[in-house]
Image: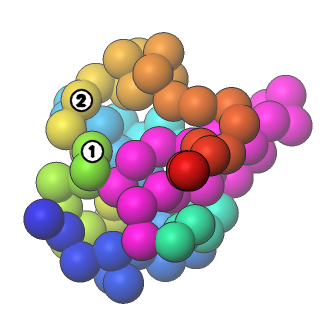
Amino acid sequence: MINTDEIRPNMPVVCSQEGQFATVDHMEGTSIIKLKKDKTGQHHYIPASWVTSTRDGKVKIDRPGEQAMREWEIDPPVYL
């Protein structure tokens, strides 16, 4: 498991194919990454469990960018 304390605002989010597809806005708790608004003005959320590395100042995830964008959330996750 990645130390989520290493995930900082403005870090690029890079897919498994090394392409940047988003930028970190901030962490929400210890398990959710809020991404900066996209071109349409929409924030997105991804689970920290997707992260495989935070080396070189980048957040690298375990899947291709297209898959990540299909699976990310547009609303903050609600935990009961």
Q: Considering the image in quadrants, where does the N terminus appear?
A: bottom left
Q: Secondary structure at mark 2?
A: loop
Highlighted magenta segment, given as a residue range = 30-48
Q: Is residue 35 above or below residue 53?
A: above
**Quick check: 74 left or right of 80?**
right
Tell which of 30 and 41 is nearer to you. 30
Can residue 12 be seen in this snapshot? no
Q: Residues within 10 Å of mark 1 (few under 14, many from 20)?
A: some
The residue that disc 2 covers is: 63
Amino acid type, callout 2: Arg
Give how far across and how far down residue 52 sits, in percent: 16, 54
Q: Is residue 55 above or below residue 43?
A: below
**Quick check: 58 left or right of 75?**
left
Can residue 52 be seen in this snapshot? yes
The residue that disc 1 covers is: 50
Give how far across and how far down residue 11 sits, in percent: 48, 67
Which residue is drawn at the image coordinates 48% and 56% (left, top)? 32
The mark lying in front, picked from 1 and 2, is 1
Circles 1 and 2 in contact, beta carbons < 8 Å: yes
Q: Which residue occupies the extreme bottom position in the image?
A: 5
Q: Find the distance from the CA under tag 1 to the CA under tag 2.
A: 8 Å
Which comes sooner in the sequence, label 1 or label 2?
1
Whether the magenta-drawn stretch holds residue 61 is answered as no
Give how far across and how far down residue 21 sits, in percent: 48, 37
**Quick check: 4 left or right of 33?**
left
Q: How many marks?
A: 2
Question: Image quarter for residue 56?
Answer: bottom left
Tell which of 37 and 1 is nearer to you. 1
Which residue is drawn at the image coordinates 26% and 50% (left, top)? 49
